[in-house]
Image (cartoon, grey):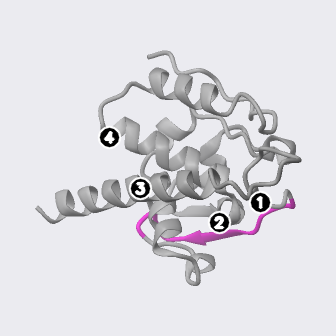
Amino acid sequence: MENMYRKNRILLTLFAVILVLSACSSTKNESKESPKKKTAEHTMPIGEETASKDVLPTFLNNTSETVQTIYQAAASHQELLEHMPCYCGCGEMGHKDNYDCFIQENKKNGAIVWDEHGVNCDVCLEIAAQSIVDYNKGKSMKEIRKSIDEKYKEGYAKPTPTPMPEV
């Protein structure tokens, strides 16, 4: 019962995040020079290892509950996010998919090496949140991928070299 409550809380929080990010990104005060949303600096991110995906890294301590929720959800949706590209330009630093914006490595012992890149990148956060919400609503990975590609095809950086899901 508690697990179901937690899953519903994460889903509701992710949905709220999408609404807030969408509202913030469509204000009339946006720069007319570029339609791109705020993206993180493309420097080599710091990785932090924790014992499992249930233990968040300390670099999230001073972030919003929303960012923490997206990181937690991203760690639990590896297969999904490994099929979703990121459009913030992080492919230039070696990212292959949206999952890489949050997780550097999954160790055999269950430990996770978290990636700080997604913390300050609205594009990374929004792609992960939208993908997870749509997946939990029953959309297929292929449907979600097509939706992400369509939404970010213009005005954003070149996508990461992410393989298309088969199903």
Q: Which residue is mark 2?
A: 119
Q: Which residue is mark 3?
A: 14
Task: Please tell me whether mark 3 sits on a helix, a strand or a loop.
Answer: helix
**Residue 145 spot, x, y in % from top left:** 54, 27
Q: Residue furthest left?
A: 1
The answer to which of marks 1 and 4 sits earlier in the sequence is 1
Q: Please state the extent of the stretch shown in magenta in the rendering.
A: 43-54
Kind of residue indicated by mark 1: Ala
The CA span between labels 3 and 1 is 20 Å
Residue 103 in view: no
| Residue at (46% x, 74% y) in the render | 65
* Whether label 1 touches label 4, CB < 8 Å: no
The answer to which of marks 3 and 1 sits earlier in the sequence is 3
Kind of residue indicated by mark 2: Val
| Residue at (48% x, 43% y) in the render | 130
Q: Which residue is mark 4?
A: 136
